[in-house]
Image (cartoon, grey):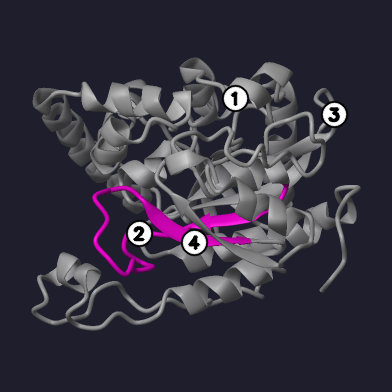
Amino acid sequence: MTEGGVTPLGYTLAYRGPFNPWNASFYSGGSSSGSAVAVALGICPVAVGFDGGGSIRIPSAMSGVYGLAVTFGRIPFERVTPSTMIKSGPIAISSADAALAYTLMAGKLPHDHFYARLYDGGVKGGGPPPAHLANFHDVSDLSDVRLGIFPEYFQDASDSVVKACTHAIDTLKQMGVTVVEVKIPHLQWMRLAHGLKIASEFAQTWDLKYHTVSSLEANTRITVSIGSTVSALEILAAERLRSYAFDYMRDIFSNHNLTAFVTPTTPISAPRLTDEAQIFGESNSPLVLDIMKFIFLANFVGMPGMSVPVGHDETNSELPIALHLLGNHWQEAKLLRISNALEQKLNFAARKPKERIEIF
């Protein structure tokens, strides 16, 4: 993965890689880049990722595999992390593999575990509701599925990405899915608030290394430096906006009876990895913020998000394109069901990276 998980581009200088499994001249996406590349190349059917700002879903999208970032607290960490947004989840070669890995990873919590106490104070020891895969194979009729789309937001991507993702939505409509237009105000400020929060949390985690380890990559040092300048006032403002976003998204799902909110996973397919970046690394805040524009809500308000490969970019070396499904809290099973339906209809697996090996 990238050093400290601080960039969604995916390349790390320490190991001079990884590269995009479909074309080594492009980024793989990150920060769980090695996990996604290993799955895409057939080295393993499932790998574990961590996601504080798309780090499961972005490499899954750019590497052409399935990535599920669960509800915050669904999959427990063995220790309390200083992040309020990082969660884990599977990266897999298929929806079924992602589903199986998810149920294994999301086991029942001990009553005294941090996440169990987080949700009910340890009074009942219940923690998150049990993980399940209800209706996963029920994909012949999706008339009970309702997808929310914010058209202007959905279309804020390259023509190739919009085309592939629109085709995926049309495919779901043919299977009975209802599409509902919704609007989410203040997305630009929510994105900024998420950026401030995750940067400040990175700075907290990496503070000691920042001051004692001289070999940190330049991009890591820049990111931690930016995070360390965030003021307490800015953090409080971001948290107030976060509370607003939490309530607004909850109301959207409730008022429209949504199964998922849908966008592209990334607005572009994988960007090119230049010769200079391979030698020195790359710090490119405008590109990073653009890549993260569709995925941040899942981290900002703790909802589950899943990236599903749906096509290839004919204008960019036939690199993968993915659709993003944002679900309500604890509703991972609904996202996996939609993913399974798309996988069966679109048959993305018919095309494979040239370097893929068939071990399993």
Callout 2: 10 Å neighbours few (<14), some, many (20+)? some
Left or right: residue 360 compared with residue 180: right
- Distance from Cα at disc 3 to Cα at disc 4: 29 Å
Question: Residue 101 is drawn in which quadrant?
Answer: bottom right
Task: Where is residue 144? Give x, y as percent.
Answer: 55, 63
Label 4 secondary element = strand
- The three-letter code of the residue at mark 1 reads Gln
- The three-letter code of the residue at mark 3 reads Ser
Label 2 secondary element = loop
Say if mark 1 contacts mark 3, CB within 8 Å.
Answer: no
Closer-to-camera residue (35/13): 13
Task: Where is residue 174? Give x, y as percent.
Answer: 73, 52
Task: Where is residue 219? Give x, y as percent.
Answer: 46, 25
- Distance from Cα at disc 1 to Cα at disc 3: 21 Å
- Distance from Cα at disc 4 to Cα at disc 1: 27 Å
Per the image, the residue denoted by label 4 is 89
User: Which of labels 4 and 1 is toward the front?
Assistant: 4
Bounds of the magenta span?
64-91
Per the image, the residue denoted by label 1 is 155
> Residue at point 50% right, 77% down?
103
> Residue at point 56% right, 41% down?
30
Callout 1: 10 Å neighbours few (<14), some, many (20+)? some
